Image: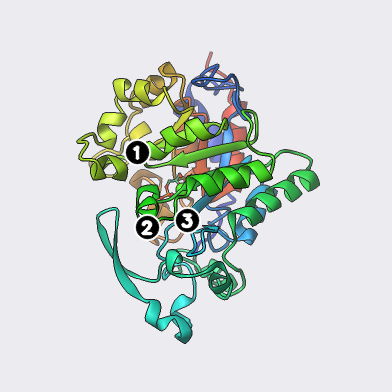
């Protein structure tokens, strides 16, 4: 079982000078995105609640989103897929066997099927085969019960939210907490959804419009692992866009079009400069910012952040998590993969690279690491 580490603050502070050297600047990032002037959140270091506070509640539930905001997240992330009747709902993937109790619903047993999504064969239940009314009968369950046993307490309690509900919650919490909680929305598998007549971009833009979140300075980022739909969104809406990248593979839309470019190509200085033509930021896998050494320990920063900033791109790497299993080997504590390791130290090393924000399953930890990073006194 994961146990929060409460005894390391002094150790962490003592390690700051070694890890960081000069203090992390109070503001970061390039002065202006690719067009249209500044965006909300620009010049700030952002803590982004990844799938909500998914370290503490089943992911992509209103409970996870609310907790993220209450823990201090600046933005909360919603991954969006479509129902059969074209309603955007919040799930990390369209296959919902791993994050809902759909397998326990005999009335949906016949919906179990095998599909190829982005070249990968998947067997399970898919959102596009369910109306919103049917999805409403399901309840979320913890994706990682072995690592996050405490989260299983909440299995069966929460519904699959719509993007509209996510945006409504964001507005309510912004009013209550007296600070703007941002919406960080990802379109999942856009080429696949286009292929089945359930395009994601138009309904998403409509939702943003209805929520009054369609302006340049609206507290919104839209993100995608594909490139074509971001270019389309760049024409459809003024809010800032983020190109997601990965340490391996290639964007599904480029693969489908026979374009040989990979994420590695897009992550070069030249690739980032091209992304700067349609996007305002990039979301790299964290290992692209600080690669790990062959033994799994944390290595030295790459040139990624400098290259991205040179292209006027914000840098929001993913995903920071407290448990040993997700940490560099040199920052793990004990042998249990589910126990917490020295996550704050990992995050301090990343803040020191000049990143502009981070996606984390544990927004409270992200807030603490950001505060510590800002407090560091430059070495004499
Ligand atoms: O969107 C940032 C991060 O969430 C990308 O990874 O797979 O968790 O959506 P994933
Ligand atoms: Ca995501």
- The total number of labels drawn is 3
Residue 101 % position (x, y): 49, 76
Q: Callout 3: few (<14), some (14-19), or many (20+) C-alpha neighbours within 10 Å?
A: many
- Residue at mark 2 to residue at mark 3: CA–CA distance: 12 Å
Give the Cα distance between marks 3 and 1: 27 Å
Q: Element at badge 1?
A: helix
Q: Position of residue 139 (x, y in %)?
A: 56, 72
Foreground residue among 315 and 329? 315
Of marks 1 and 2, the one in the foreground: 2
Ligand 1 within 8 Å, label 2 CB: no
Q: What residue sits right under mark 3 in the picture?
A: 81
Front-lying residue, 106 or 306? 106
The mark that comes first in sequence, 2 or 3, is 3
Judging by the rendered image, the residue that carries numbered circle 1 is 287
Give the quadrant of residue 258: top left
Q: Which mark is residue 67?
A: none
Residue 17 visible, this orientation: yes
Closer to the observer: label 2 or label 3?
2
Residue 369 shows up from this direction: no
Q: What percent of the width, then of the height, locates residue 171?
A: 72, 46
Q: In the image, is 129 to the left or to the right of 6? A: left
Q: Is mark 1 within 8 Å of ligand 1?
A: no
Q: Residue at x 50, y 43 (%)?
A: 359
Give the residue number, with chain letter if any, for mark 2: 196
């Amino acid at each position: 079982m994961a146990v929060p580490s409460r005894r390391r603050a002094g150790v962490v502070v003592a390690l700051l000078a070694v890890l960081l050297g000069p203090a992390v600047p109070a503001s970061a990032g390039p002065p202006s995105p690719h067009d249209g002037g500044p965006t909300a959140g620009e010049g700030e270091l952002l803590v982004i609640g990844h799938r909500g506070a998914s370290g503490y509640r089943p992911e992509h539930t209103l409970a996870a989103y609310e907790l993220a905001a209450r823990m201090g997240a600046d933005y909360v992330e919603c991954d969006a897929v479509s129902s059969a009747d074209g309603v955007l709902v919040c799930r990390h993937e369209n296959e919902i066997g791993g994050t809902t109790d759909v397998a326990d619903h005999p009335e949906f047993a016949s919906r179990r099927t095998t599909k190829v999504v982005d070249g990968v064969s998947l067997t399970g239940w898919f959102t596009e085969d369910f109306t919103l009314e049917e999805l409403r009968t399901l309840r979320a369950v913890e994706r990682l019960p072995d690592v996050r046993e405490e989260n299983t307490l909440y299995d069966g309690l929460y519904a699959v939210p719509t993007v509209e509900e996510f945006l409504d919650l964001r507005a309510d919490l912004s009013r209550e907490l007296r600070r703007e909680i941002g919406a960080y929305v990802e379109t999942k598998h856009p080429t696949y959804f286009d292929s089945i007549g359930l395009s994601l971009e138009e309904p998403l833009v409509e939702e943003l419009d209805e929520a009054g979140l369609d302006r340049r300075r609206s507290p919104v980022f839209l993100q995608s692992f594909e490139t074509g739909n971001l270019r389309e969104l760049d024409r459809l809406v003024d809010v800032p866009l983020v190109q997601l990248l990965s340490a391996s593979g290639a964007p599904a839309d480029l693969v489908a079009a026979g374009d040989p470019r990979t994420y590695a190509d897009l992550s070069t200085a030249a690739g980032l400069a091209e992304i700067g033509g349609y996007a305002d930021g990039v979301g790299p896998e964290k290992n692209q910012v600080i690669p790990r050494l062959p033994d799994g320990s944390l290595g030295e920063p790459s040139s990624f952040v400098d290259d991205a900033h040179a292209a006027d791109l914000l840098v929001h790497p993913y995903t920071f998590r407290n448990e040993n299993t997700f940490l560099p080997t040199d920052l793990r504590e004990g042998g249990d993969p589910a126990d917490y390791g020295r996550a704050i130290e990992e995050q301090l090393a990343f803040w020191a690279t000049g990143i502009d924000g981070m996606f984390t399953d544990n927004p409270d930890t992200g807030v603490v690491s950001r505060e510590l990073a800002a407090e560091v006194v430059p070495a004499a």
